[in-house]
Structure formats: structure tokens, C-alpha cells
Amino acid sequence: MDAVFDRHGQTIAWLHRDFIYNLNGTQALAFIYGGAVFNYSNTLLGFFNDGFVRDGDGNSVAFVSGAGFGPQQPAIQDHLIPPIPRIPLTRSMPPLPPIPPLSTWYWSMLTWEQFIN
């Protein structure tokens, strides 16, 4: 499990394989398919590339350690122990992901909660 951090360096979620889990690891909130991030209603939320979770405009909402091209990353504020993830829900086949927008050097105006919900 890899920690997912917000623009302030706070752990906000966990990434395990292609699934994004809530902070305590008990619920898969979204999944990554073809570089796109979908919720379990198969709604496109954004994209995941270069270690950044990005909104529909290519701006970064969150990142994982080792992320590449994107905005300046803050210092990590906490070092939580990863939880043991629950088995994610079975997902239906999402639609083909659209072509992602160009990645930017900017942080999104969306908070993690706005993005994931």
C-alpha cells in the first residue's frame, strides 16, 4: 500500500494495485483503469499519471511518493503505517477512458473530498 498525499503533505488515502482506499483501508473508493480514475458507479473522476491524481483539467489533486512531473510537492507531514486493505468490491467494466488532458504544474482547486465524491 502506498500513501496518497494531498497538497499539504497529509496522508488522505491509500493506493493498492489499481484501487484507491479510504484512510483506514476499509473501503475502496475508486479504481484506476487505463490511466483514468473511476468511482464504483463508473463515473470518470480524473486521471492518474506520473504519480499524481489529476482532475479533468490536468491539475494535481493528490500524489504518491516518488511522483514525477507536476507541482512542487510539500514535505510529508505524517508517516502512517499502511492498513491491511479489504478486498475491493467487484467492479463492472468501465467505459473506455478518454484521452487525458495535458498534465499541468498546478494544484487543483478541488480538495480530495470534492474530487473523490
Image: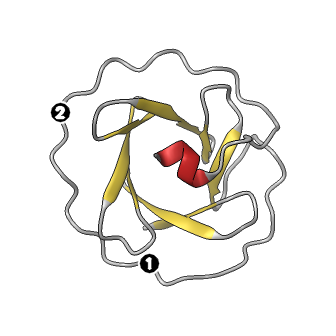
Residue 35 is at least partly visible in this image? no
Asked which quadrant contains residue 102, the reply is top right
Query: Is 57 or 64 nearer to us in this picture?
Result: 57
Residue 85 rendering spot, x and y as whole percentages? 30, 70
Position in image of residue 99 (x %, y %):
53, 15
Q: Which residue corresponds to the image point at 67% horizontal and 25% vertical from the top-left?
A: 57
Q: Counting other residues with Cα less than 10 Å from the Cα at mark 2, is it few (<14), some (14-19), or many (20 or more)?
A: few
Amino acid tagged 1: Pro
Indicate whether 52 appears above or below 33: below
Q: Earlier in the sequence, mark 2 or mark 1?
A: 1
* Residue 94, percent from left and from top: 27, 26
Mark 1 residue crowding within 10 angstroms, few (<14) / some (14–19) / many (20+): some
Q: Element at badge 2? A: loop
Residue matched to label 2? 92
Q: Residue at x 72, y 67 (%)?
A: 9
What SS does tag 1 mark?
loop
Q: Where residue 47 sits in the image (x, y, percent)? A: 53, 34
Q: Residue at x 30, y 70 (%)?
A: 26
Q: Which residue is tagged 1?
A: 82
Q: Which quarter of the figure has residue 103?
A: top right
Indicate left or right for 52 with 104 as reference.
left
Q: CA distance from mark 2 to mark 1?
A: 27 Å
Which numbered disc, 2 or 1, marks the residue closer to the eye? 2
Query: In the figure, residue 1 lies in which quadrant?
Result: bottom left
Identify the amino acid type marked 2: Ser
Q: Count the marks.
A: 2
Relative depth, front residue between 48 and 66? 48
44 lies left or right of 40: right
Q: Is residue 104 visible?
A: yes
